[in-house]
Amino acid sequence: MNYDQVIKRLKSLKNPKNVEGMARFGINPKNTLGISIYVLRPLAKEISKNHNLALNLWKSSIHEARILASYIDEVDKVTEAQMDEWVADFDSWDICDQVISNLFDQTPHAYKKAFEWSKRKPEFEKRAGFVMMAALSVHDKSATDAKLLKFFPVIKREATDGRNFVRKAVNWSLRNIGKRNRALNKQAIIVAKVLAESEDKTARWIGKDALRELTSKKVQARLA
């Protein structure tokens, strides 16, 4: 399937009612067709992996075409330059989360970008850094505890950013790392307690919310 055929297929699946619903969940309605992720995934399998097609779909600026691009791109062909170019285009939390968890967290540049992007000013670029941390803590089965522990100082440093999509990602990264194993859980709880006692209201929220899950019976039982 070539570029024109993919775009034609996507436009035929347009659902304006879904676009309205997505907007209510904080998804940018601009250039959005309202196609469910459950429709995009099978379509991605039908298209199969294709790096050049992924690059062209991204350039279309169509929301669903960009999510599709994250499914069909070839990890070994993704460069740092491409990652920086795409992250600068992020305009919605779902684009950010999909691209990171479908593609970017599998690249050899993932850890470097997590640290780099966590310092960015734009909301979704900064979110990307913490979504990367959250994704790596789940998907990188070979990661050592020491490697993931390096994220904690960054989490503490940025815990005062009150922007909605940043603070939620910072919280998410702390919770995910703390749910990986018992040793990391203990360390994450220490971080969460420090944040929970902060004078900053955003840091307090991040800490208290993370603490609630990390110390819950469900999580503790799973890690036992």
Image (cartoon, rainbow, N blue to C red):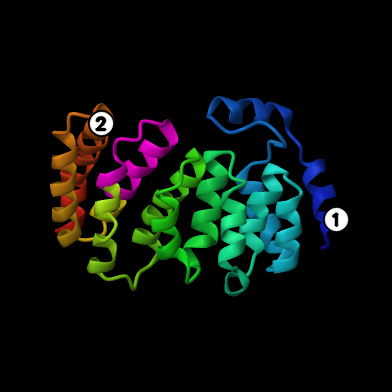
Q: Residues within 10 Å of mark 1 (few under 14, many from 20)?
A: few
Residue closest to the eye, 140 or 110: 110
Quadrant position of residue 215:
top left
Which range of residues does the magenta coloring cover? 156-175
Q: Residue 170 at x, y = what percent?
A: 34, 43
First along the sequence among labels 1 and 2: 1
User: Which quadrant is the C terminus positioned in?
Assistant: bottom left
From the viewer's perspective, is the residue at label 1 or at label 2 nearer? 2
Q: Could one spot residue 27 in this view of the protein?
A: yes
- C-alpha gap between disc 1 and disc 2: 47 Å
Three-letter amino acid code at disc 2?
A: Trp
Q: Could one spot residue 50 in this view of the protein?
A: no
Residue closest to the eye, 64 or 83: 83
Q: Is residue 170 above or below residue 160?
A: below
Q: Residue 208 at x, y = what percent?
A: 20, 34
For the point 68% across and 59% down, the residue is 44
Q: Residue 162 at x, y = what percent?
A: 36, 31
